Amino acid sequence: MTQTVEIPLWLFMLIVGFAAVTFASHFLFPSVRWFFRRRLERAVARLNQRLERPIEPFKLARRHDMIQRLIHDPQVAQAAADHAAAAGIPENVAYEQVRRYAREIVPGFSAFAYFGLAIRAARLLSNAVYRVRLGHQDEAALRAIDPNATVVFVMNHRSNMDYVLVTYLAAERTALSYAVGEWARVWPLSRLIRAMGAYFIRRRSRNNLYRKVLAAYVRLATRGGSTQAMFPEGGLSLDGAIAAPKLGLLKYIVEGYDPQGRDVVFVPVALNYDRVLEDKILTSAAKDGDRRFRARIGLVALRLLWLWMTGRYHRSGYAGVNFGRPLSLAAFGAGREGDMTKLLGRVLMARISAIVPVLPVPLIAAILQQHGPLSRAAVEHRLAELIAAMPLAQVHMPGENLGYAVDAGLRQLVRRGLVCGGNGQFKPVAERRDLLAFYANSIRHLMPQDGARPGGGDDFSAPAKGNAASAGS
């Protein structure tokens, strides 16, 4: 016992390392975690004082704890048992699948990552790429939402910039948890997105067990009051028009709704752009008839950076965002029979459609596509007629000046090669007509057609006419 034992230096260092890790994990790390946890709780308490909708405890729960809660949810446990019986596998194997799905779905929200990094980055990027305009919003109705209700922002999906733009504009209200698809599961982007509170979903999954786990998470998040943001269309619009809703997440929310618990309030949000950064990728996918494409937003960002470094960068026109009238699920479902999810999806998409921002490029694209070559004066005349024919539309008029709007729109279209000017006439470029249609389609439903009432509204919504306000430079 008292004899000297010689060991190699590398083995001695390895033993010391293991001993240090064991000591730290048992004695130091719990204290350190408790110290930083206390500081975080105080910081979040100060942050909640200035937020319109404070961050709910559900979102601040430890990711490990949330995963365990999801795994042991009674409905998930039953689904795992049913799956094991149907597949002829042991239940512990099915539970391992559940664990893997839960780890994939559950975010790990960080208030520092969201408010310290993401909001600043979103503000900087939004105003660097666009002239951001926050238009119609019923401020009184938004502030009147029950503080205990779960708020779900539902939006049309035009670009991957939608995430950035709405995160920036909602920064003073609350922290949003997005449902994001497979495109975001790329390291290290996935870690940042998860830290911002986003949860990953497999949009094309046919696995019933996976769907049960996802439905359980959405149910827990909704009952826990977590403010969410979702795109009912399920993916980017390939032709520029608003698509019919896909009801998966809406169905989970409706089926998990407890009439005796929190109300769920849906806030319609409509976005539109003078330029969609991925427009060529989307129109190419529409031609090929294949939604399985990769929106190489990183390459687009690198190109914009190169243009900026070489002094040739110009902002991509205007980006408009409108917030619609909230819809309470408790009021909507009271006494209603039939497929409530399908009706809810239709009503929400109608409300979104009715408040889509009408910007210079989509307006002029629609005019040139319909009337062909026009002089600048003729474009301005047609623009005035079209705006007058859409009294309920949320038209953004830069500088409240029709002439300036025409110049801004034509400048964008000519610069991008969608329109060419010569002999005092502006006409569409034949090879780019698909892109011109892409922008015109974003407001096609608002334009008067065969005597129909423009606006695409429904019996539940009547958006107020109002001037757009600036949210950026």
Image (cartoon, helix red, strand yellow):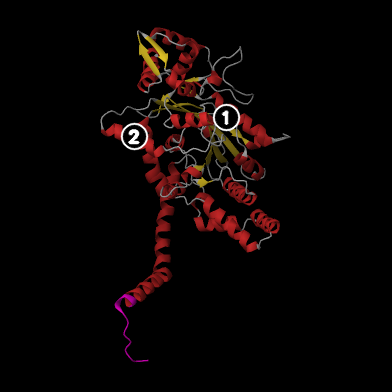
- The quarter of the rendered structure image containing the C terminus is top left
> Is 5 colored magenta in this rendering?
yes
The relative height of residue 38 versus residue 169 in the rendered view (above or below) is: below
Specify the quadrant of the image occupied by residue 49.
top left
Q: Determine whether the residue tagged by mark 2 lies in a helix, strand or loop.
A: helix
Specify whether residue 158 is in view.
no
Q: Which mark is residue 303?
A: 2
Residue at (35, 8) in percent of width and height: 424
Image spot of residue 148 (x, y percent): 57, 43
* Residue 14 marker: none
The question of residue 461 being in magenta is answered with no
- x then y, percent, for residue 332: 66, 33
Residue 18 x/y as whole percent:
38, 73
The quarter of the displayed image where residue 132 is located: top left
* Front position among marks 1 and 2: 2
Tag shown at residue 243:
1
Q: Is residue 426 something one can see in this rendering? A: yes
Residue plotted at (59% across, 55% down): 70
Amino acid type, label 1 = Ala
Q: Nearest the camera: 424 or 42?
A: 424
Asked whether, in this view, residue 31 is left or right of residue 72, the answer is left
Where are the magenta residues, as a range?
Answer: 1-11
Q: Main secondary structure of the magenta part?
A: loop
Above or below, comparing residue 120 to residue 414 in the picture: below
Q: Earlier in the sequence, mark 1 or mark 2?
A: 1
Provide residue 416's location: percent of width, then percent of height. 37, 23
Q: Nearer the viewer, residue 296 or 325?
A: 296
